[in-house]
Every structure is written in C-alpha cells, then in structure tokens.
Image (cartoon, rainbow, N blue to C red):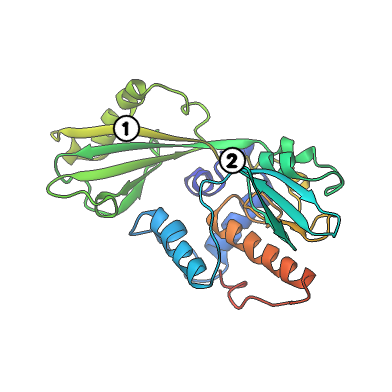
Amino acid sequence: WDLVGVATLNATAPNASAALAAKVFRTGLLSEPGAADIGWAAVPLGDLHDTLARKALESAGVEIHLRSRVDSLTRTEDGRWSVGTDGERFAADTVVLAVPQGDTHRLLPDGALDDPGRLLELTDAPILNVHVVYDRKVLRRPFFAALGSPVQWVFDRTASSGLQGHGQYLAVSQSAAQDEIDLPVAELRRRYVPELERLLPAARGAGIRDFFVTRERTATFAPTPGVARLRPGTHTRAPGLHLAGAWTATGWPATMEGAVRSGFTAVDAALEGLGRPHEHPLQEAA
C-alpha cells in the first residue's frame, strides 16, 4: 500500500485518511485502463508552473507582482476588497485567496468562515529530497521505486537540470519524512549513499561530485483520518472572497491535480459572483 500511498498522500497507511487513500487507489488504478500509467516532467517544474504560466497570464493582459507578501485583506465601504501588500494597496471586485491554510487564517476577515480555527488544525507534512551527482551513469532508467529499503523513489534529473558532460544527477524523493526532515546532511549522506550503492551496483565504484539536501517542511497538508471536516470549500460568507489551494475541499489529497481543480472551482465561483458564469472546458479533464 505504501509504495503508492506514501508518494501520493505524503503519509503512511496507519496515518492516512481512508477516504483519501480510497480516492488515490480508485482513481489511479481502477478508473480506466491507462489510469496507472506514470508520467513525469522532462523539464524543471518551474518551467511548467512559473515560466509558461506567467507567459500565458501576461499574454492575457494580467498584471503580475512577484515576491509580494499580502499583509491585509479588508472590505471597503463600497463593498469591494482592498488588498495590502508591501506598502501598496490594490482594489478588487473579487479575490481568490490561494495561500497556505495558516496564511489564509491570518488574512480572513471576521465572519468569512464559520469556524476559521479549523484551518490551524490542518497540519503540514514534510518531503525530503536527497540529491546525488555521480561522475558517471549509474541508472539506466528514468526513475525507480524501491521496496524493503529506506529509499522510496529515485529520479534521473540529469537532463532536466542541464547537467553537462559526463555524470548523472539522481534525486531521491522521500515523502512522509517527519523522522528525517531535520537530520544533518552528513547523517543523510551516511544513510543514503550506501543504500543507493546496494540498489544500483553501478554506483559502487562511482565518484560523487556533489551531494546536497532540500527540505520542504510544509510540502503538503497532513492527510490524517478525519481531515475532511477541516477542509473548507471555495465559497466563504464574505461576498466576492473565494478560497483555493490543494488543502481546500477538493476530494483529492495534496497533489498538483487537486490544486488545479481548486483553481477551476474558485475561478468559476468568482465569475459567477461577477455575473459572468463560465464552465471551464478542461475542468473535468484536468
């Protein structure tokens, strides 16, 4: 169960919502013949989530402010919204608040949710990534998963990272990493380099050009049993204010697919509130 469940839920079976686990296995294995096919990005995710998305938004005339922290969200006397960020204020007819649940709790005006305190009960789950750059090719496939090993999933990131010349860059992705997220790099190296050599015989004689660790302490919300009661929908009690994010009530765990669906739902709600209802043609296929 954990071969699939840990990677998709970011939790081990005893700590995961049965409803979300059922969603993963039903959708990923049973919904259609090709449902279990695995795809992966051949380019850095930043190219997909930032570069291409930003280009599409800018071509549509959207004004984008990067690295701007939202400090306040208040209702104006004329019923609009005032968004405060970095000393500036922006007026808006409708707002989609697509930030982590803790920031949502901080920014929500009084009365927007019946029980805003439940957002603080939505705890986070970490993901640890161990990066190893070898001086030669040690893995012939684009990725693999391991059983009976502390290693979960390993991806060949050589091409997507732009690594030139001889060598290979492997990324070890470790979900549900609560016990390892704060371990020193040296200890993680002692733990994972020998295990990669056990799993990949070609790595045993290879030199290591670089070894580093990236830590995402708040990678996802923790999909604990009963978590559904903590996840709000996109609508709030405040007219013109909508919520989005993988942590909202999408019916999905904290995946990119869930985040995309929350975006569609929030945009549909915002357009409907503005008197411009529109059903996105990709909503069901995303």
Q: Give the image location of residue 265, x and y in percent.
A: 69, 65
Q: Quadrant of residue 261?
A: bottom right
The quadrant the C terminus occupies is bottom right
Would residue 265 be visible to someone looking at this image?
yes
Q: Residue at x 78, y 61 (%)?
A: 240
Q: Residues within 10 Å of mark 2 (few under 14, many from 20)?
A: some
Question: Label 1: which residue?
Answer: 212
Disc number for residue 192: none
Question: Label 2: which residue?
Answer: 13
Q: Residue at x 34, y 25 (%)?
A: 191
Closer to the camera in the image, 261 or 86: 86
Residue 177 drawn above or below residue 68? above
Q: Secondary structure at mark 1?
A: strand
Which mark is first along the chain, 2 or 1?
Answer: 2
Closer to the camera in the image, 44 or 63: 63
Q: Residues within 10 Å of mark 1 (few under 14, many from 20)?
A: some
Would residue 138 be visible to someone looking at this image?
no
Using the numbered discs, state the Cα–Cα distance from disc 1 to disc 2 in whole angstroms: 29 Å
Q: Residue at x 84, y 59 (%)?
A: 79
Q: Quadrant of residue 130?
A: top left
Q: Quadrant of residue 115?
A: top right
Amino acid type, residue under disc 2 in the picture: Ala
In the image: residue 169, left or right of residue 130: left
Q: Give the image location of residue 197, x and y in percent.
A: 23, 34
Amino acid type, residue under disc 1 in the picture: Phe
Q: Give the image location of residue 233, x and y in percent.
A: 76, 55
Q: Give the image location of residue 245, x and y in percent.
A: 63, 53
Q: Residue at x 43, y 64 (%)?
A: 52
Residue 98 drawn above or below residue 32? above
